[in-house]
Image: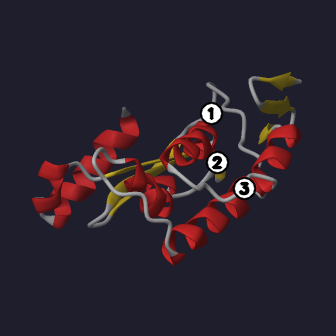
């Protein structure tokens, strides 16, 4: 079944092949508007990409207010990595409410991440960049913040 840019089957949830074609053919952004457009599509499928926020950070930073648009080699590399990860995204398992879930979390000096699993199959990835006040957190506090974030 095709539903909201996804293909849902007994195997799980996958990115719609028509969206994979769109991502594959997406041209390199030339301005902030084009970055926002690409990141809107990429962000919609972030649950398919482990550590999405960390991976996307060089491009995401171009969207900041009053930031001069400079597309450098790091942005180009990030763009290619994101396209590759989105076009080869795994099939996510369909959750079964009658089975146990496992949440695995991690934190770094850049962001927080988590994976929702069931029977060692990925249901979804989740991540975000650290908030300004979290940059000063001790490692154990960051790990706790990752747990809280994943459970929300």
The one of 101 and 56 positioned closer to us in this rendering: 56
Figure quadrant of the C terminus: top left
Q: Residue at x 83, y 37 (%)?
A: 16
The circle drawn on residue 48 is 2
Give the label, 3 or 1, closer to the camera: 3
Res. 30 image quadrant: bottom right
Circle 3 sits in a helix, a strand or a loop, which is it?
loop
Characterize the local packing of mark 3: few (<14), some (14-19) or many (20 or more) Cα atoms within 10 angstroms.
few
Give the label, 2 or 3, closer to the camera: 3
Q: How many numbered marks does the figure carry?
A: 3
Q: Residue at x 52, y 51 (%)?
A: 31
Disc 3 versus disc 1: distance between alpha carbons? 42 Å
Q: Report whether 94 appears left or right of 128.
A: right
Q: Which residue is mark 3?
A: 27
Circle 2 sits in a helix, a strand or a loop, which is it?
helix
Characterize the local packing of mark 1: few (<14), some (14-19) or many (20 or more) Cα atoms within 10 angstroms.
few
Contact flag, marks 2 and 3 (Cβ < 8 Å):
no
Res. 101 image quadrant: top right
Circle 1 sits in a helix, a strand or a loop, which is it?
loop
Q: Residue furthest bottom?
A: 73
Q: Residue at x 72, y 33 (%)?
A: 94
Q: Report whether 149 appears left or right of 96.
A: left
Figure quadrant of the N terminus: top right
The circle drawn on residue 99 is 1
The one of 27 and 54 positioned closer to us in this rendering: 27
Above or below for 6 versus 53: above
Q: Is residue 130 visible?
A: yes
């Amino acid at each position: 079944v095709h539903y909201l840019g996804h293909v849902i089957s007994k195997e799980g949830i996958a990115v719609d092949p028509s969206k994979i074609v769109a991502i594959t053919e997406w041209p390199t952004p030339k301005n902030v508007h084009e970055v926002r457009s690409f990141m809107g599509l990429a962000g919609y499928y972030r649950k398919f990409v482990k550590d999405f926020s960390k991976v996307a950070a060089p491009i995401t930073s171009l969207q900041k207010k009053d930031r001069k648009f400079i597309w450098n080699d790091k942005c180009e590399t990030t763009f290619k990595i994101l396209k590759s990860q989105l076009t080869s995204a795994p099939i996510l398992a369909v959750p079964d409410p009658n089975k146990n879930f496992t949440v695995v979390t991690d934190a770094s000096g850049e962001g927080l991440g988590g994976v929702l699993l069931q029977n060692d199959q990925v249901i979804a990835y989740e991540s975000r960049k650290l908030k300004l006040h979290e940059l000063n957190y001790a490692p154990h506090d960051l790990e706790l913040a990752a747990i809280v974030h994943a459970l929300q």
